Amino acid sequence: MLTEALFVSTLLFVIGSFGFVIRRNAIIMFLCIELQLNAVNLAFVAISRFVGIEGQLYVFFVMTVAAAEAAVGLAIIISIFRHYETVNVDNFNLLKW
Amino acid sequence: MTEILFMVFAAVAIGGAIGVVAGRSPIASLLFMVATLASVSGIYVLFEAHFLAAIQVIVYAGAIMVLFLFVIMLLNLGHDYQRDVKTGLWAILAFAVTGLTAGILGRGFLRAGDISFYDRFGAAAAIDQAIAEQGAVGVIAEPLFTDYVVAFELTGLLLLVAIVAAVVLAKPRSAEA
Amino acid sequence: MTLFEPLTSMLQSGEAHFEPFLPGLILLLPLLGFVLNGFLALRSAAGSSRALREGGEWDPFKTEPRPATHTLPSLIGPGVMLGAFVLALINFFGAMGADLHDPVIRSYWSWIATDTLQIDAAIQLDPLSLVMMLVITGVGLLIHVFSVGYMRDDPGYPRYFAYLNLFVFFMLALVMGANYPVMFVGWEGVGLCSYLLIGFWFSDREKSDAGKKAFIVNRIGDFGFLLAMFYLFTAFGTLDFQPIMEGAPDQLTYGSGLVTTIALLFLLGAAGKSAQIPLYVWLPDAMAGPTPVSALIHAATMVTAGVYLVARSSVLFALSPVAQATVAGVGVVTALFAATIALKQYDIKKVLAYSTVSQLGYMFLGVGVGAYAAGVFHLVTHAFFKALLFLGSGAVIHSMHHALHHTHKDWDAQDMRNMGGLRRFMPITWATMWIATLAIAGVWPFAGFFSKDEIIWAAGAWAGAESNPYGGLYTVYWVLALTAALLTAFYMTRMMVMTFHGQNRTGESEAEHLHEAPRVMTVPLMILAVLSVFGGWINVPEDLSASFFGLFGALPMSEWLHHWLEPVIHSAAEIQTEHMGEISHHAPFGGGEVMWAAVSTVLALAVVLVSSRALGGRSVKVAVEDGEPTAGLGRILYNKWYVDELYDRIIVQPVLGLSRWCWRFVDSVLIDGTVNFVANFTRLTGWLSSLFQTGQVNLYAFVLALGALLVLGAAVF
């Protein structure tokens, strides 16, 4: 079952990556990041079953970080939206040469 | 039974993930995401990680996703839908790169998935016994408040900082107005 | 009280032990003068740059009384010299009354201390260094006093005295050092001061170029000095004079390649500093400096450092007959060669410059034929009469300059064709300079007679030494030296006649402003004149002292200098006697010392008299009408045998060409090209990578994913 779980984790991760690359909507890109985090969490949990309880602890910490990140990230999106009236990242390209 | 349940959860999780990426509106993506999170939490249960499964549902699917939903609704994003999926060469390239990554990772896991390799740690039996003695929460809580107490306290601090940052960032610039 | 104890005990008892009296202070006083005058010079320079910044002209003499920066050096400069001279005298008389067989060495601190090389900052008092100290501080004092009058109206007055004091400090370090490195510090220091003072009027391109020329030519010689020191170190493991001079006869084989190499390298260094062929070319150009500088540095002291070096290293030279023959050959050829050039120069200082080169050649001949005492003797007397000649020419130039300046006539104040008949206006200068001229011409009883005659005699006697392998060569040297002596008498007479006798050619209105130099300048001239007369009596050769030339034994100090220097040169003399045998008591073509002394002084006197009569009757055209000699030997001599042109062609131009190539190709193309390529490449790379910086988050994410893939791939495959 471990192998299968890791496969699922892999699939979730690459789907998240793919989504992050092809979508322009900041909210959906954010969701893709959550997807990737979940994929990693899944791998942690699956392996911790056979290696030790610490894997679950890491998942716990990852979740905390994800929560913090979601809070700050969404605040940024709100802040940007106030300026541009959109969340399409193609419009946010000031940081370039 | 476990295998069947795992397959179901895995199928829902992957289907939900595809839905997140392919969803036309943020709301749809978000709902697919909730489905994925729920089924991942189901897989956690199958791996005897009951506490994590619980907070996955409560914190992730509950709190964080609600926060997303709240923002989407606040910004009224559902209605000004515009096509935001990159297509064409870009999509093909992205697919190639992520597909290759999946291939390499999968190939690696196929080799590493040999359970006998992990079984020599004898962790599964130890965890089962610990759960039986201390309960699902106690198993997590004991190392969390002993060996990892510093990291645990730091996550508390991190959350505090995140809250302050969120408030500062999202606050309307009243001084300007 | 303790300070003066050695002094009093020394003066009272005069017993065998010599206790030096504050020897370090002799060095420190000129250094103190340099510091004080240098401070004043900086103050003055600050004033000048402030005036220039405000757009005005800077003239320190605008206000009366003169600013302190231009009056205090008159006290400080000669003052410290007086102190040093008195101290040197005290030490000298102290040493005279004592047995100074071993040098007294005062080590102040450890300068370089490594595993194998130990060098102390040490000074050495022995007969040779004491004589040199007396000459440097004594003649130096007179020249400092003269400078007070000569440089009085120069805006750079304090800077001048700062440099002059610094020079004296380094010169004293050169002769007082107890090892080669300390000597080398002085050696380089006097070179530096020479450069600074030749280019004293540095706003004149020609003069600053002359300073550079002196410095660069000297550098070639210093290279030889350094290599010689390295060889010495490998041979002895030390660079102190005493162990080297004591150990050399045992440790080095007579006539071996090593000792010849060392001696020849030292000769290269000495030739650079003392302006000998082939490195003499800088000295005539060095006349660009103020005339007292020429007197002090380029006649009396610094240029004799090479002679001092050879005398100091006498043991090393005595061990190598090849090196000795080379030293003597270089000396005598230089003496003759420079004398021929001096025949046809019109610049009064150029005549004296070539005369100096020529006389230095005599000194080299002296030390080259093993007559170290004679070489040092000529060094001392030459310091007197050549300093006198230079200072006298300085007085003449001073007067000429004033006269021409008065009527704004742009004639050359140094060209003898513009002078003539100055005797009427400057009687003291005229008389003193004639004394010096007779001295340098070798007329009895003036100083130069004894010293020069002794050198020439030594060359002849050396040629006849029992087992001298180069006897024939030395005979040639002897003939050449005699010829040069006659030329000396001629060109000096020519200079005196053109300057002081005949009709005045300066011009009617200018002649009214010609005047004798002030007292502060004439008094040093008179003192030097006295020394030029009697200076030779300190070392009347033994064979002459009983004859007419020694007033039938009435001169009290027969062979005094020879005996005095005995401790320094006796081991060299022993080596020479051992290998060469006793020197001859008659000249190569017969005749004793008395006879040849008579011949040479009569010939010299005859040349002086005949040429003064012949030249006196000749009319001379002034410089602007005369122009350059156009044909014959005169043209070649006027152009100094075209040596400068030759050097320019075979050395300077190739070096310039190489430098230009280094500049245009190595620097501009290779080095700049590399640097510019790196810069351009970086910029190009930066520009290319900036294209990826689109501001599109998706692209960044894609690149990130691609990078992750690459890392994964690298990890797996």
Image: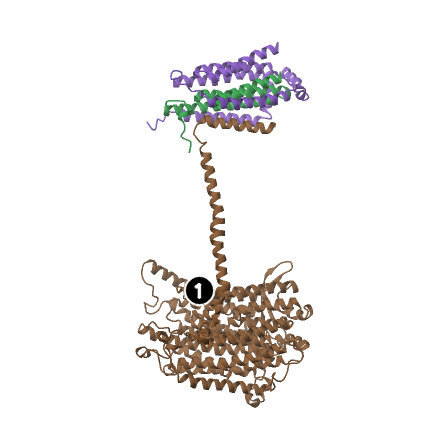
Chain colours: A green, B purple, C brown
Please say whether residue B119 is visible from this viewpoint: yes
Residue tagged 1? C209
Q: Residue furthest front?
A: C631
Of residue B143 and residue C484, the one placed in the foreground of this image is C484
Residue at 59% across, 22% down: A55
- Report x, y in % for residue B47: 60, 16
Seen in the picture, residue C682 relative to B74 is either above or below; the reply is below
Q: Secondary structure at mark 1?
A: helix
Parent chain of label 1 = C
Please say whether residue C5 is visible from this viewpoint: no
Left or right, residue C697 beside residue C583: left
Quadrant the C terminus of chain C occupies: top right
Q: As shown in the figure, which amino acid type bears the numbered disc 1?
A: Asp
Q: Residue furthest top?
A: B1
Q: Residues within 10 Å of mark 1 (few under 14, many from 20)?
A: some
Task: Tell how many labels.
Answer: 1
Left or right, residue A14 beside residue A76: right
- Report x, y in % for residue C133: 53, 73
On the image, which quarter does residue B131 sit in?
A: top right
- Report x, y in % for residue B60: 50, 18
- Report x, y in % for residue C562: 59, 80
Left or right, residue B109 beside residue C357: right
Of residue C599 and residue C438, the one placed in the foreground of this image is C599
Quadrant the N terminus of chain C occupies: bottom right
Residue at 31% across, 59% down: C55
Of residue C22 and residue C673, the one placed in the foreground of this image is C673
